[in-house]
Image (spheres, rainbow, N blue to C red):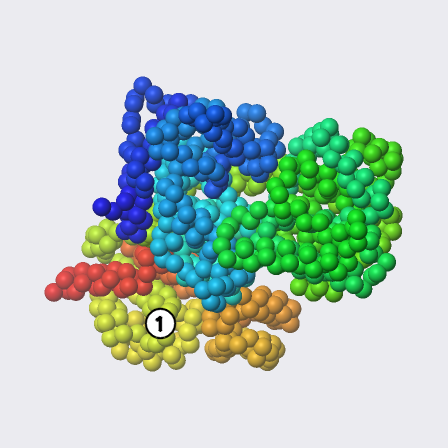
Amino acid sequence: MVSRSYSNLLELASGESPAPSFSRVSNRIPRIMTVPGIISDLDDDPSETISTSSISPERIIIVANQLPIRVHRKPDNTKGWIFNWDENSLLLQLKDGLGDENREVIYVGCLKEEIHLNDQEEVSQILLETFKCVPTFLPFDLFTKYYHGFCKQQLWPLFHYMLPLSPDLGGRFNRSLWQAYVSVNKIFADRIMEVINPEDDYVWVHDYHLMVLPTFLRKRFNRVKLGFFLHSPFPSSEIYKTLPIREELLRSLLNSDLIGFHTFDYARHFLSCCGRMLGLSYESKRGYIGLEYYGRTVSIKILPVGIHMGQLQSVLSLPETESKVSDLIKQFHDKERVMLLGVDDMDIFKGISLKLLAMEQLLAQNPEWQGKAVLVQIANPARGRGKDVKEIQSETYATVKRINDSFGKPGYDPVILIDDPLKFYERVAYYAVAECCLVTAVRDGMNLIPYEYVISREGNSRLNSLFGSGEPDPKRSMLVLSEFIGCSPSLSGAVRVNPWNIDAVAEAMVAALEMSDTEKHLRHEKHYKYVSTHDVGYWARSFLQDLERTCKDHSRRRCWGIGFGLSFRVVALDPNFKKLSMEYINSAYKRSKKRAILFDYDGTLMPQSSIDKSPSFETVGILNMLCRDKNNMVIMVSAKRRDTLSNWFSSCEKLGIAAEHGCYLRMERDTEWETCVQIIDCGWKQIAEPVMRLYTETTDGSTIEDRETSLVWCYADADHDFGSCQAKELLDHLESVLANEPVTVKSGQSIVEVKPQGVSKGLVAKRLLNTMQEKGSTPDFVLCIGDDRSDEDMFEVIASSVSGPSMAPNAQVFACTVGKKPSKAKYYLDDASEIVRLMQGLASVSEQAMY
């Protein structure tokens, strides 16, 4: 029997999904895991259903791998559980930081303890009623594959720049672990479905454990208001593209409305991956970065998370904190010893061993600090498990022993390793006493340790009195931070180091110890001002404000889903934009008497990806059939040279051709070429061509196309990021040197083009309509098809001519673009093959009418 969790994966791959239920229950969550991997059906009880209109619109559903809940069995092994809030959870601090009592917050996530199947319904009921938490119950085997397997062995190392070059270095990609990851994300989506009001609620998904969840939610509700924040680093494209399911993850993230990152580097890497692997470009407008993705704007948010100021200050005021600080003062200050502090998880990316080597070098090269400097290293338990964790533990213990054996004295150990779990107030006490905090991680998403240290060093009047100083005493703190952690850019007063450079880290530690009190105070003040104003509440409010801004026009857009499996995405376009029906246009074509037909060539009749751009025998035959109909005037509008087009369509006697975007035009094969605008002297090419040649020589894969009246620099075969960067520079350069020439410089799809002023495909459309009007053949059927930005000029002219004299009253007008995207056209067809079928259908109607 195939489990439901795996069948859901198959269901997603087939593009099918059951119709979602919009009813919700007031007091309980009835859908629970009844058998490992199987979800029971929803028990719809009309008496318990609440109308969605009664739900407050100010509601947020926060989704993360773990709920902000601590779980304990009742004492004396009696049946049942004790639940309470985890005050250290970022998700809980996030809610408190919002400071809006009217905004309801619901949490969806797993519990840290496994709940027996028989207790799951009762636990769901308690957590929903008491804490507004919706637990996601996962079978142990599935959770192990999902969390310890895919998340910790494959995603987490790769996102921290660790490639699985051998089986011992990280986990090689395992398809079964990936399927478990997808299945768990699907289960999360099912739990969200039970509580969501899709028209009003905001959903905020956290971290890499749930990166495909946006696809499941968007598939169920096309207009869901969805934000995603990644708390880990996002690697460069060179690292990320080694992931076998790289496009699936990118497309899933792009099903969010807002994607948040801690630093610009992480966002830049993500945008680069979208450009290189999906061909997407981004724009920055008024300070906001956005990606256009099938008519939807996916916004990018760059803001590091903060700490909960209120919680930390309350812990500083606790009597037990004061007592612990007093003990540490006696242990260090009273013995004239200076504490350097490290607080890290015991994993391979936190750089504990590099920090210890730097401490060893400090003592060896600076004998005056022997007997005075003490490194207290607090090592929290690793979140993952495996061979690498055991290796780092063994290396740490061995290094600490070697340093203490070499430099220790009776009553003095230069390194104190604390690997027992500490309570938060104990950690805060160490912060308050330490003269310097060291964070030497080789890669870390954010790391809030430096923020906590700065606030703890600010202290309060009671703690200051323990140091023998009053309130006026200036506060001091020093930070030595790795360049590779997320908080480093925001703490500009820190001494930044490359943790791999042991010499530099040791020198930074000495500089921090020997820096003047005045300098330490100034750096502390700078950090305190930033950390205290950019707390977790500021971060949460800013993210939600941007999410609301991004989603404000959801209700005004027409949405539908396309694609299968994890390639699913939603197209959001103007309500009047729709797919062109073959039957409808054929019917209108039959009824009409005079017809004007305009179409683009590249990307319309010929796919952009095709290397051989010459028309097929079939295409030429269709065009000839359309042109033989005496009621038709057909013009092909292209950017190509007129000699190329004349050669390709030499057998099309009645076909009108507009070359070089309409600069040249002939209505039939045997007529002379006319010009739609005055052709100027092309002396400007002598200025533009050397500039283009310079960029071609420095941009591998780029080429120059010299047309009669224009010059085109094409970078379709160049590196995506470099080509885009060079194109922007070239555009500015050309605009500068050609400022006094009668030409325009424009960017297009992988091109930068210089052409005479006033030339556009819109002129061709206007010329055709005016010519037919002058001949007394005002069209009652107009068809215009194109695929790129230059074709929008034709659509605009046709739309503005609908009620004018150049068209018959009640004329049938079909402006059609290729692909679903924002356009001035009112219709679309999916690709060039559909355009050819459309033209073939119209040609068949003409052929039948002639015989």
Q: Is residue 564 left or right of residue 556?
A: left
In the depicted structure, whether residue 158 falls above or below residue 722? above
The residue at 87%/36% (across/down) is 469
The C terminus is located in which quarter?
bottom left
Mark 1 burial class by Cα count in 10 Å: few <14, some 14-19, many 20+? few
Quadrant in which residue 77 is drawn: top left
Residue 551, horizontal then vertical, whole percent: 49, 40
Residue 72 in picture, x, y percent from top left? 49, 30
Q: Quick one: 703 or 775, which is closer to the camera? A: 703
Give the structural element (helix, strand or loop) at label 1. loop
The residue wearing badge 1 is 610
Outermost residue toward the top?
47
- Considering every residue shown, the one lying at the far front of the view is 410
Q: Residue at x 67, y 59 (%)?
A: 399
Tell me, yes or no, if residue 686 can be seen here: yes
- Say which of 583 and 728 sits in front: 728
Residue 720 appears left or right of 413? left
- Identify which residue, 780 or 640, lies in the foreground: 640
Amino acid marked by disc 1: Ser
In the image, taking residue 396 as reference, residue 579 lies left or right, namely left
Residue at left offset 40%, top offset 77%: 642
User: Position of 181 compared to 457: left or right?
Assistant: left
Return the residue nearer the eye: 619 or 324: 324
